Each structure stands twice: as C-alpha cells, then as structure tokens.
Amino acid sequence: MRTITIRISHTTRDEATVKKSSFAAIPLLLIALGAGLPFHEAAAAGDTFTIAIKDHRFDPSELEVPAGKKLKLVIKNLDATPEEFESHELKREKIIAAKGQATINIGPLKPGTYKFVGEFHESTAQGRIVAK
C-alpha cells in the first residue's frame, strides 16, 4: 500500500508581511549602496575648479590646471544678467543664468593654453585655462 502525503501550506498574515518587507528593503539597500557613488565618481573624475563671473569679467581670468586629468569647471555667475561660457578650443558652451551656476566637464587636456570668453560680453569677459 502506498501512502500519499499532502501538505497544505498556510501562510499567516505576519509571515506575508515579513516577506513583503524583505522585498521592500531591496530598493532601500540599492539606494544606500548607490549613495557612495557620487563621492566615488567625484574622486575618479578629477579636480574641481571654480571661476566666477562678476562685472562681466572672469575671476580668475587665467586658471592653471593639471594636464592629463578629467576636470570639472564650476562657473558661478554673480552678475544680474546671464552669460554664455564659450570655448572653441575646449568645444564647450553653456549659458549660465543670472545669479546661477553651471558645471562643465573638460579633459583630459594636453599641455597648452585654452581660451574662453563670455559670449554676451566678449569685450570684457575673457579668460584662459593653462594645462600643465
């Protein structure tokens, strides 16, 4: 004679809640793990340099940066009017709102000098990046 065993599984509400909360924790875990990425990316991306626009001039007007590294330029517009950062040599252009700022990624640069201008006030807003 054969014996057949039939098991009926019954999940209580508390067990179902535990299962749900386990799956709910996965996105939180991924967010927590991802929280370290910006710091790692910033460290891997290289150095950050800041240039201010004030009275339609760049300050500093000459910026020395390391050659061969990826760089971030943070451009802060302190003026009450917008300005456009433009550099044909860096192949970058970006409008910076009045009292705003923008980040521009550049590099790695070969040693040399790279000119940039504020296109809206080109007669006064001029500068250069020197990569060494």
Image (cartoon, rainbow, N blue to C red):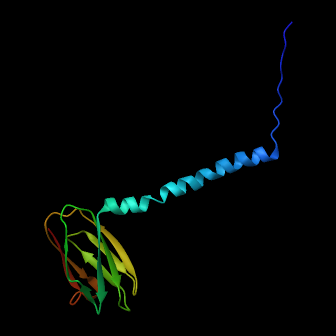
Q: Nearer the viewer, residue 86 or 79?
A: 79
**69 over 25 or under it: above or below:** below
Residue 60's image quarter?
Answer: bottom left
Q: Is residue 51 left or right of residue 1?
A: left
Residue at the (42%, 62%) spot, across then down: 38
Q: Nearer the viewer, residue 1 or 73?
A: 1
Residue 61's image quarter?
Answer: bottom left
Residue at the (59%, 56%) spot, across then down: 28
| Position in image of residue 85 (x %, y %) | 29, 79
Residue sticking out furthest to the top: 1
Q: Is residue 21 left or right of residue 37?
A: right
Residue sticking out furthest to the right: 1
Q: Nearer the viewer, residue 123 or 58?
A: 58
| Position in image of residue 96 (x %, y %) | 36, 81
**31 over 114 or under it: above or below:** above
**33 over 56 or under it: above or below:** above
Q: Is residue 1 left or right of residue 123?
A: right
Q: Quadrant of the C terminus?
A: bottom left
Residue at the (37%, 60%) spot, across then down: 41
| Position in image of residue 53 (x %, y %) | 30, 86
| Position in image of residue 35 (x %, y %) | 48, 60
Q: Quadrant of the N terminus?
A: top right
